[in-house]
Image (cartoon, rainbow, N blue to C red):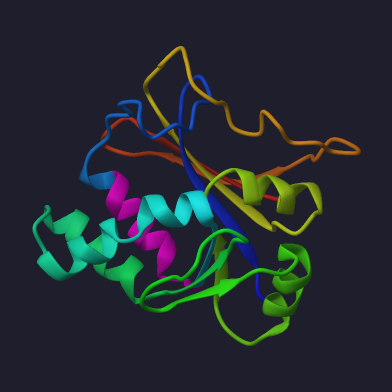
Amino acid sequence: MRKVIYGINLTADGCYDHTKNFGGGDDVHEYFTDLMQDVDLIIYGRKTYELMVPYWPDLAKAQSGSIATNRFATTFDAIDKVVFSKSLEKVNGNAKLIRSNPAEELLKLKKEPGKNISIGGVDLPSQLVALGLVDEFYFLVHPTIVGAGRRLFDDLQLSQSLNLKLAGSRVLNSGCVELHYLK
């Protein structure tokens, strides 16, 4: 069965709001590019999809960023995507729009052959974490305190605590810390 992995950037105070300045460098894009090597499907809700597309596909075409940024854009653009939304009219490129129950669809997708399934954003992953459908967590903690903004899992409702097992950690050159946890 395919694994569902969840990767996200966070500040040291737990903020995930990308309108805040996280800092970081090319090693952040290299980190997520490496993580995507074992992924052949990305799942988003509407908000995250609209943050990522068309920005990254456009950058993949233009190749106007740094080498690391361009590599991430190209890798991201090549991976198939599923977007769960009841309000979007359409999605672009190699994305598929699904309006039905995300948990049911994810269970079907996990049974299909393939590499890992990556989920991104916060609202949809929170729902899937609460249902026990996320297998691995990749938190990239930036050495920044922003003091304001939504915190990861602020709205998560669990029937009991989810204890994770640390599978690995490392410090990137930018000072970001990767924390890899297993369910």
Pick out the residue farthest to the top: 147
170 w.r.t. 145: above or below: below
Is residue 85 shown in magenta?
A: no
Quadrant of the image occupied by residue 97: bottom right
Pick out the residue farthest to the bottom: 113
Q: Of residues 131 and 100, which is closer to you in this image?
A: 100
Is residue 29 visible from the viewing direction of this image? yes
Magenta segment's dominant SS is helix
Is residue 183 visible from the viewing direction of this image? no
Q: Position of residue 111 (x, y in %)?
A: 73, 82
Count up the numbered dots: 0
Q: Position of residue 17 (x, y in %)?
A: 44, 31
68 w.r.t. 94: above or below: above
Quarter containing the N terminus = bottom right
Q: Residue at x 8, y 58 (%)?
A: 64
77 w.r.t. 113: above or below: above
Q: Position of residue 22 (x, y in %)?
A: 33, 29
**Quick check: 98 left or right of 63?**
right
**Quick check: 66 left or right of 102?**
left
**Quick check: 48 left or right of 63?**
right
Q: Of residues 29 and 166, which is closer to you in this image?
A: 29
Is residue 30 shown in magenta?
A: yes
Q: Residue at x 11, y 53 (%)?
A: 66
In magenta, the rendered stretch is: 28-40
